[in-house]
Amino acid sequence: MSLAFALCLIVLFALAAIGMPVAYAILLAAFVYLGVAGEGIGIAGKVLMDGLFSSFILLAVPLFIVAAGIMNAGTISDRLLRFCVGLVGRFKGGLGHVNVVASLIFSGMSGSAVADAAGIGKIIIDMMVKSGHYTRGYAAAITAASATIGPIIPPSIPMVLYALVSNSSIGYLFLGGIVPGLLMGVVLMAMNSFISHQRDFGTEEPVPVRELPALTVKAFPALLMPAILLYGIYGGVTTPTEAAAVAAFYALMLAAFFYRALSLGAFYRILVDSARASAAVGLVIGGALILNYVVAAENIPARMASGLVGLNVSPLVFLLGVNLLFLVLGCVLDATTIILVIIPLFLPSCRELGIDLVHFGVVAVVNCMIGLITPPYGILLFVINAVTRIPLGEIIREVLPFLAVLIAALLLMILVPDIVLFLPRLLGYAG
């Protein structure tokens, strides 16, 4: 390791430790490397521009953010919740099940765990607390846990970012996330059912079966959005980036004209908020591109790959070790940083060991989403704390059982790759 790279790492971790936003920490650390290594600072601009202009797929990120904002602003979320209450609200722990099913459905529209938690999550927490059957900590915990499904079922902003660094097919990554996302929903509902019986949570008044068709009709246009998205990509009608534009346009037409629930003022605020969120993601992406150049200049990925192959590590042991590392890093780093900065270090080793990059990508994204609810730096815990004012300690105590079952589901995905690869292979993936 060179002196320049050692100083780069020291600056990066020191700035992150004192609370500087990770994008700025990455950029400053990269500039330190370039300065000490005697390379012109201008090279950072060239790397940044080359990376952004050659990555058309990055346009999908702001478009999915806009689509999520529109879905949250209109009455679409309310209609979906009423549909979910009618569907699973009659069972023990009914509103907990509603919470998970709503996240499964909403994940097909937003692609963002934070959008899920801050939008539809706040509504369902209020419903659960007002029912009198659930503690506020439990309501917040299951909301945070179910929001992790958001970026697993397509569309998925983290998978777009993984596709950027790995050059994998976004279409197959999206397909690979469907079964794992459903598995996560099943284990969360199973844990909710177990806890509900243990604590004897009350049941909600069931929605009469005769009302279900009407609730379905009202929610049906919103339920169509994931189907339109997936058909566009896998039917060859649109590229993934174009599909993101279609998703944003469909959400706008639905909220503004079909449901008549979106004013011009609200739309303007959505665009401003989406621009800010996109800029925040863009800064991290820019910093990561420059830092990846630094890592490549130090030849670190090739050294790691040759070192691991020399140790004769089996693919399974490698996957288990890397995922354990990701779980630890998830306690202190956000998902975007792990995907853009840490994961590229292991991709050459994956290729050398014959590990499928779609399988690795989906498992890594699931791992990063679990990190969003892992104390002490689980960003979803902070988001829900911010929007509900429920004390962080209460949320953390209640989220631990859900964290355990999600880690068990992750282990199952690692041990049984077909959970991820079944649908991609069904539709022509040859990996």
Image (cartoon, rainbow, N blue to C red):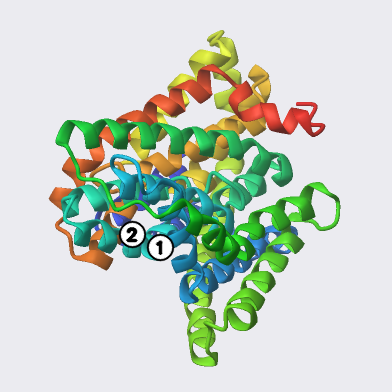
In space, the residues marked 1 and 2 are separated at their CA atoms by: 6 Å
Q: Secondary structure at mark 1?
A: helix
* Residue found farthest to the top: 312
Residue extending furthest bottom? 265
Residue 270 at x, y = what percent? Answer: 50, 79
Please tell me whether mark 2 sits on a helix, a strand or a loop: helix
Position of the C terminus, as image quadrant, is top right
Evaluate whether residue 343 shows in this view: yes
The answer to whether marks 1 and 2 mark residues whose Cβ atoms lie closer than 8 Å is: yes
Using the image as rendered, state which of residue 40 and residue 165 is in the foreground: 165
Q: Is residue 299 visible?
A: no
Q: Which residue lies at the image location 61% right of the left edge and 29% below the top edge?
A: 420
Could you tell me the amino acid type at mark 1?
Ile
User: Image quarter for residue 32?
Assistant: bottom left
Measuring from the top left, give residue 74's x and y in whole percent: 50, 76
Q: Which residue is mark 2?
A: 124
Residue pointed to by mark 1: 120
